Amino acid sequence: MAKRDYYDVLGVGREAGDGDLKKAYRRLAMKHHPDRNPDDPKAEQQFTEAKEAYEVLSDGEKRAAYNQFGHAGVEGNVGMGGGAGAAGFGDIFGDIFGDIFGAGAGGGRRGRSARGADLRYELELTLEDAVRGSDSRIQVPTLVRCDTCSGSGAKPGTSPSSCSTCAGQGQVRMQQGFFSIQQTCPQCSGSGRVITSPCGECSGQGRVQKRKTLQVKVPAGVDDGDQIRLAGEGESGAAGIPAGDLYVLMRLKPHPIFSRDGDNLYCEMPVSFAVAALGGNIDIPTLSGRANLKIPTESQSERVFRLRGKGVRNVRSGSVGDLYCKVKVETPVNLTRRQKEVLSEFEELTNGGDSRHSPRQNSWSGKLKSFFEDLVS
């Protein structure tokens, strides 16, 4: 008997995607499964036919061979087990029962957590504390183990008992014909235990809300966004389960003088017109104290000077960054009449912008002249 076209079997077009194939197969598998049709001799045949079609079309290589050569291209590769079809079959029905019974169906003891939740705390630091390191005291609101019941959730003098519904497994199994379904125990919610006499302090939860005080040692050189993990300092787990971790995230406060980029520091230093023109020495701040910077004669505004090794020591490699100081020439303000006269005299002595004294100004003037000439022409 000639085999039917696999696309016709599933009732989809040849351009059908994986989602369409899966949806079509689920519909046919549920409709024709032998356990649902014990009195229909054709049901098993139709079920097998749909499974075979899905096994081929859900596999990229097999589908390409089938599209080119038909059934001859996939003979001997269908129904071998362990391939895409077998996995696809399990996935199909896993999806079906996952939709009905929730994510816990078919799994192990998923109702139980391995440990309590992790927490995050943002710690604000000054640049100095981040560069040099510090010891900081923080207070973290969290769930901690109840001291009254030692985290068991049971009233002192009593203890939790094993759940009779699931025999302490946290899961119950339902069997119906072909299918075996495992889901979270509704009696104990997956814990495997039942508390008949709950603790009055924590109401049977084994945890209470408190603000926990911790000492955090911040290593020298941390940067904004770095984090420190404090193992076991997170939220306490229910019913004596170990606590999670606390992640302390570093946040640097703005600094009035310096900005930071990695291991390097940056600052701006205002200098007078006279110092920029004649040169001189100025004191500049660093995180380790004052440093003397020599300003060469005829220095222009925005010139950057580099001070090696005056930056931040890297917390991982130990290498030290640099300090970059940008000179900002300050125009004098609130001039007296005599100061204005001296400046006017200075302007005349420099011939009102002689190219020898103001090369940038004359270069700019030349560019403007060419620009306007091009506009006119």
Image (cartoon, grey):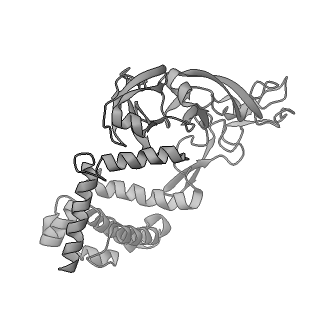
The image quadrant where one finds the C terminus is bottom left
Residue 79 appearing in the image: no
Q: Nearer the viewer, residue 281 or 59?
A: 281
Residue 114, image x, y percentages: 57, 34
Residue drawn at x 31%, y 74% is: 16
Q: Left or right? Give the position of 349 relative to 371.
A: right
Residue 160, image x, y percentages: 76, 31
Residue 5, image x, y percentages: 24, 76
Residue drawn at x 33%, y 50% is: 348
Q: Nearer the viewer, residue 28 or 242?
A: 242
Residue 22, image x, y percentages: 38, 67
The image quadrant where one finds the N terminus is bottom left
The number of numbered badges drawn on the structure is 0
* Residue 79, picture quadrant: bottom left
Q: Nearer the viewer, residue 135 or 343?
A: 343
Residue 334 appearing in the image: yes
Q: Nearer the viewer, residue 377 or 7?
A: 377
Above or below residue 88? Residue 300 is: above
Q: Left or right? Give the position of 355 relative to 262.
A: left
Q: Left or right? Give the position of 214 relative to 288.
A: right
Q: Left or right? Give the position of 65 relative to 287.
A: left
